[in-house]
Amino acid sequence: MQLQNALSQRISEALQALFSISVDASHISLQPTRKEFAGSFTFVTFPYTKQVGKGPEQIGQALGEYLKENAAEVRGFNVVKGFLNLEIEETEWLRLFRNLMEDEQYGQGEPSGRKVMVEYSSPNTNKPLHLGHLRNNFLGYATSEILKANGHEVMKVNLVNDRGIHICKSMLAYEKFGNGETPESSGIKGDHLVGKYYVLFDKAYKAEVDVLVAQGTDKEEAKKKAPLMLEAQDMLLKWEQGDAEVVNLWKKMNGWVYAGFEETYRTIGVDFDKYYYESETYMLGKERVEEGLQKEVFFRKPDGSVWVDLTDEGLDEKLLLRADGTSVYITQDLGTAELKYNDFPYDQSVYVVADEQNYHFQVLAATLKKLQKPYAEGIYHLSYGMVDLPSGKMKSREGTVVDADELVAEMIDTARQQTEELGKIEGFTEAQAKELYHILAMGALKYFLLKVDPKKRMLFNPQESIDFRGNTGPFIQYSHARISAILRKAADMGIAVDVANFEKVAQLHETEQEVIIQLVNYPAVVKEAGNLFAPSIIANYAYELAKAYNRFYQEVSIFNETDEQARNFRIALSAMVARFIRHSMRLLGIEVPERM
C-alpha cells in the first residue's frame, strides 16, 4: 500500500507537470500487471485521452519517461496500448520487505471505531446442522475475523430459531412415538435424536395426506386438514399461551439439541459472543407491530391480520401478524433487530443467510425504515448460494440431509487415508496423528467452501477438497509445514531470522521478487476482503502466496547457497511467508500444522 500510494502521488505530479491536469493521488488507480508483461503495477491511460488530446500510448510513454527520471522507485516501464506497466527497483522491494519483517502488526488495520455485528449459524432446534450450515458458519466466522483485522469492533452472534410450527412437529412426533427415548438411552446425539422425530412427523403426516386424497379430498386441502398438522398447530397455540406441559417438553428437547450443537461447534472451530433466541424476541416483535399500527405505517385487514405496504419501495404487501395473532418470521426479526442494537449499538448488522432469503431482508430493512428505527440503514444481508453434492440439493424433511457431523467424520477419515498413503506421519504419536487428521480435514472443508465467492452456488467435492495439490487447504497447509521444517533446520544451524543478517543483499531472483510482491500486497487484500465481505479473497491470496513460494523453492537453493547473505535472506523470506500463511488462514478459521 505504501508503494502504491507513493506511485499514485508521482503519477499525479506527472499529469500536472506534463499535461497541466490536476488529479488527486487518491483518485489514481493502480492494478497488478498481468503476468505476460514485465512490471509490477499498471496505470490505465485511456481515461485521459480527451483532456490531453493525445493517444493512450503517447500518454503512457510520456508518463513512463517522467517517472523513470523523477521517481526513485521506478526502474523501467513498458507501454502496451493504453496500459503503462511500471517496473520497480529491487532495492525498493527489499526496503519494503525489511519494513514488513519488523512490523508485527503488518496487515492489521488501525482501530476504525466502527461497530459491526455478524449473525450467523442461526439453526433450527428441530434438526442437526447440515452441509449448508457449514458454509454459513465458516462464512460468518471468517467474515467476523476479517472485519476485526480491518480494525472494526465485532460481535459474533447466533440467533436460534427455537419456536414455531416446525419445532412443534418434532415435539408432537416425540410425544406420540418417543416412548421416553433420550440421548443417553439411545446413544444418539441430542440434535440428531430430535431430527429423527422431525423426519418421523413428516412420514406420518404424508401418510395421512395420502389417505385423505384417496378419500376424495383435494391435495392442498388434505395438507391443511391432516390430523397431525391440526395437532401441531394446536400445540403451537398452547406453547404461545404458556401451557406447562408443552413448554416443559419444548425445554427438554431444545436442551438436547443445544448440547448437540455445542459439540458440533467445538469440532468445526466456530464460536459466538452472544446467543439470541426467537422465543425471547417474538413478543418484542409484536410490540413493534403494534407501534406500526399506532403510527399508521402498518394496517389491519378484515380478518385481523396485520400487514405493511411496501409497494412504493418496489416490494409487496407483507404479512407481519397472522389473523390468529401468532407471529411470522419477520415479526421475530423486528424484535431481534432492536434487542441486538440495544446490546451493541452497531453501525452495521450483517446477516449471513442463504440467498433464498434475499427478499426477506429487503422487506426487513424497508419495514424498519417505515418505523424510523436508527439501525435500519445498517442492515446488510450477506447472501450466499446453496451447496450441492453430486446427488443434488438437500432436503431435510425427507431425511436425506447431508449431515454436518457425518461429513466432518468422513473428511477426517479421508484425511487419515490420504496422509497415511503419502507417508507424512513418520514420528507422530497416535494423539499427534489424530490432531493432524482433524486439522487437515477442517482445513480442506473450510477452504473449499470459502474459496468460492459467497454469492455463487457451489458443488462440494469432498475428495477434491483434500488433495495435497492444487487450490486446496491441504496444499497451503503442507506449504506451511515445509517452511516450518526449513526454519527448524536454520535454527539448528544457528541462523536467526533477522534483517541484520542480509543487509548487503541488493539483487533478487525473479521468484523472490514475486513472493515479496505477494507479501507487500497483504494489507490491501485484507482491506478488500473486509469491504466486500468476501473471505474468498483471503483464501485465494493464501493459495497464490503458497504457489509463489513453491515456485521459489523449486527454482532457488536455500541451504546450498554459498553466499551467506543470500541464504539468510531466503530463510527470512521463508519465515515471512509462513507468518502470512498463518495469519491469512487464521482469518478463515483454519489451522496450519508445523509438521506433516
Image (cartoon, helix red, strand yellow):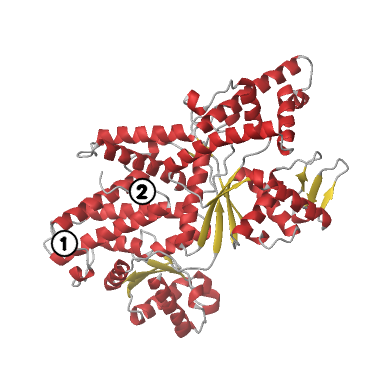
Q: Position of residue 6 (x, y in %)?
A: 40, 76
* Above or below, 148 relative to 87: above
Q: Label 2: which residue?
A: 591
- Using the rendered view, name the quadrant where residue 168 is placed: top right
Which part of the image, by quadrant, shows the C terminus? top left
Identify the residue at horizontal 54%, vertical 44% (top origin).
121
**Callout 2, which amino acid?**
Glu
Left/right of residue 124 with respect to residue 100 in the rendered view = right
Q: Position of residue 557 (x, y in %)?
A: 17, 56
* Above or below, 350 relative to 566: above
Identify the residue at horizontal 72%, vertical 16% (top origin).
211
Disc 2 to disc 1, C-alpha distance: 26 Å
Q: Label 1: which residue?
A: 495
- The one nearer the camera, 193 or 516, is 193
- The one nearer the camera, 352 or 391, is 352
Crowding near the residue tagged with mark 1, few <14, some 14–19, many ≥20 C-alpha atoms within 10 Å: some
Identify the residue at horizontal 77%, vertical 24% (top origin).
225
Left/right of residue 549 with respect to residue 281 in the rendered view = left
Left/right of residue 504 with respect to residue 31 in the rendered view = left
